[in-house]
Image: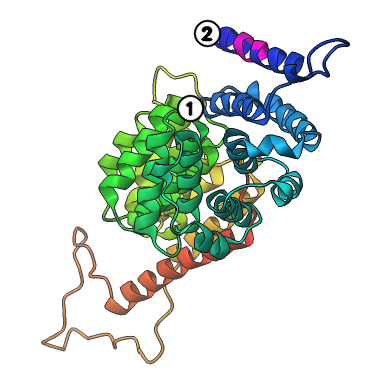
Amino acid sequence: MRRARLAKTCAALAGFLTASLPPASGAPEDFALEPYQMVRSLQLIQDRIANGDSAAMPMQRKLLEMIDARLQKTDIDAFTKERNFRALLMYAMSGGNPTTVTELLAKAKVGPADRILAKGVMAYINGHPADAIAALRNVNPLAEEPELGAFMALVKGSVLAVENPASALSLLDQARLLAPGTLIEEAALRRSMALTAQLGDKARFLRVSDEYICRFLHSPYAGQFADSFVAGVMKLHPGLDINAIAAVVSDMDAQHQRFMYLRLARAGTLAGRIELAAFASKHAEPPATGSEVPSDPRAGLYASIASIPSGNIAEIVSKLQAINPDRLSESDRQLRDAALHIAREVSARPPMPEGVRPRASKTPADKNATPPPTANAAPKPDLASVKATETMVSQAHQQLQSIDKLLQETPE
């Protein structure tokens, strides 16, 4: 199946390359592709990328270079045709050369409505969101041709995300409606995740995440999805049901599940979300039997750190010492060392709080003396000691978070 897709992709590119060659002697000049035809070829390649065709990535780079070279030689009168002008805008929003687009738009003879669209697009690709918002505020993506309308909805949704997240989310829904199964929908879903988390919409966050997994899990941009998913879970937790999180992750294949749970475990550990960290660490481990997948030391590391406040400290120290630091990234090695230091401190007797004196021992002559504990009775914890331990545990998590902020995140 993969070879068949690759063959079709190569055939499409071969056809484009053939059509893009200078016309042979005696051949009609109009044999060359028009701008809208070139951009359509680019969109086909990008949609394959969104669906996980890694072989299309180098083709996209080549196509962008070829289209750029052809556009620079295209007669400016070609852009008086509406479809060519709109294609130029789509090329700009598809990763095209902004210098070429700027030069062509400056010369193109178009009406006021198209000039507004051009102004908004150029402001967006040049990193001026406020200008893009001002130019596109009255543009209705649903009133445009679907291909261009999808891009306009994506752009407007992106630049409005900070100013008006609810409106931005509605625009991203329009982009998905106008361009299902495309790279535009893939990008709209990823950006929708951050907005649903920002708005506190737990149900919609889970639904959007699940839709992305079902449609675009093998996209080269799935790593950004993972970032957004983990960030959203951390923002919405603990109000987000752990079982609901697990239901979404279960739609991934086993390898992606372990990857996601490891990231959730690490984030939960550093944030002091003990329940989430323990749950994710457990699921990041391969099954005890019947699995050829080796255990990942990171799962044990995060689980051990998360259990410091409530677990058997001696056992935790033993587990941390057993983790081979050579199998960890530099950042996680430092986390392991910090966790060992903290666990050892927690296991030591907490220092006596300032101003608190030890109680004087009572003699047998004291009728009100408390009898010594029996062998089977657990001694009552000293309140000051308990509070000191809780303070140390809280400081432990703060220290781990501080360490993590100083480290470069190592790619998984």
Residue beneath disc 1: 255
**Vertical arrangement, residue 309 with respect to residue 76, above or below:** below
Question: Magenta stretch: residue 198 in it?
Answer: no
- The secondary element bearing badge 1 is classed as helix
Task: Give the residue type at disc 2.
Answer: Met
Report, in whole angstroms, how far the alpha carbon at label 1 lies from the one at label 2.
Answer: 21 Å
Task: Give the residue type at disc 1.
Answer: Gln
Residue beneath disc 2: 1
Q: Is residue 57 left or right of residue 375?
A: right
| Residue at left offset 57%, top offset 12% | 5
Earlier residue among tags 1 and 2 = 2
* Span shown in magenta: 7-11
Question: Seen from this angle, which residue lies furthest left?
Answer: 367
**Based on the displayed image, in which of its 4 quarters is residue 308 positioned?**
bottom left
| Residue at left offset 72%, top offset 31% | 61
**Vertical arrangement, residue 245 with respect to residue 214, above or below:** below
